[in-house]
Image (spheres, rainbow, N blue to C red):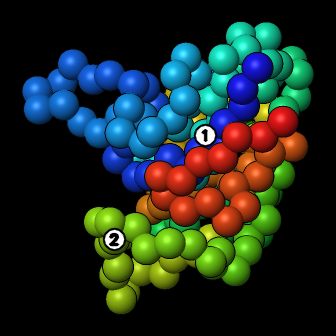
Amino acid sequence: MSLILFNKPFNVLCQFTDRSVPPRPTLAGFGLPPDVYAAGRLDHDSEGLLLLTDDGGLAHRLTDPRHKADKTYWVQVEGEPTPERLAQLRRGVVLNDGPTLPARVEQIDPPALWVRDPPVRFRKTVPDAWLAVTLREGRNRQVRRMTAAVGLPTLRLVRSSMGPYQLGGLQPGQWRQVE
């Protein structure tokens, strides 16, 4: 059984092939071991920890909400995260596919991250802030939709941990195998 911790770069697909013309960057370009597959997904425009395994049972335990594996994201948002907005996120937000479960949300100092290419747009007149958002469910683009629903559009999204596994010092495109 293999378990790989991979720091997925911005604008890389969480799959090994792409039929788009021209093809977009995929996991195939990072020298990962054969026969591993992503346990869960990260959007093309999201970064950070992606777990890959050749064990279907482990992948299920890591991604099924019934197993309650927390996923923590560092989220740069546009706007001021007022106590009311943070409380809305903590209670859960109603999205077009139904209400979300409550989330753990904290405002944090900007994390020490790599420079993103291309960089996040900067506007002198609009403040931004960083949040740590922890979820136990994983709907399509959920964090982005939740922050937008409370008036804090996401500028940058980095998954920092999934269950007991942490990004640690891995740089974009780097990976390591764990026991």
SS class, disc 1: strand
Tell me the tag on residue 50: 1
Towards the viewer: 176 or 22: 176
Measuring 73% from the left and 74% from the top, which residue is drawn there? 108
Answer above or below: position of 78 versus 43.
below
Answer above or below: position of 121 versus 95.
below
Neighbor class of circle 1 (other Cα within 10 Å; few <14, some 14-19, many 20+) is many
Q: Outermost residue, bottom direction?
A: 124
Q: Which residue is mark 2?
A: 119
Measuring 80% from the left and 34% from the top, which residue is drawn there? 136
Residue type at mark 2? Pro
Quarter of the figure with the N terminus: top right
Which circle's residue, 2 or 1, is located before the other in the chain? 1
**Which mark lies nearer to you, 2 or 1?**
1
Measuring 69% from the left and 55% from the top, which residue is drawn there? 167
Towards the viewer: 111 or 27: 27
Towards the viewer: 72 or 19: 19
> Residue 47: x percent and y percent?
51, 51
SS class, disc 2: loop
Q: CA distance from mark 2 to mark 1?
A: 21 Å
Residue type at mark 1? Leu
Quarter of the figure with the C terminus: top right
Q: Are marks 2 and 1 in contact (CB under 8 Å)?
A: no
> Residue 18: x percent and y percent?
27, 23
Residue 20, by quadrant, is: top left
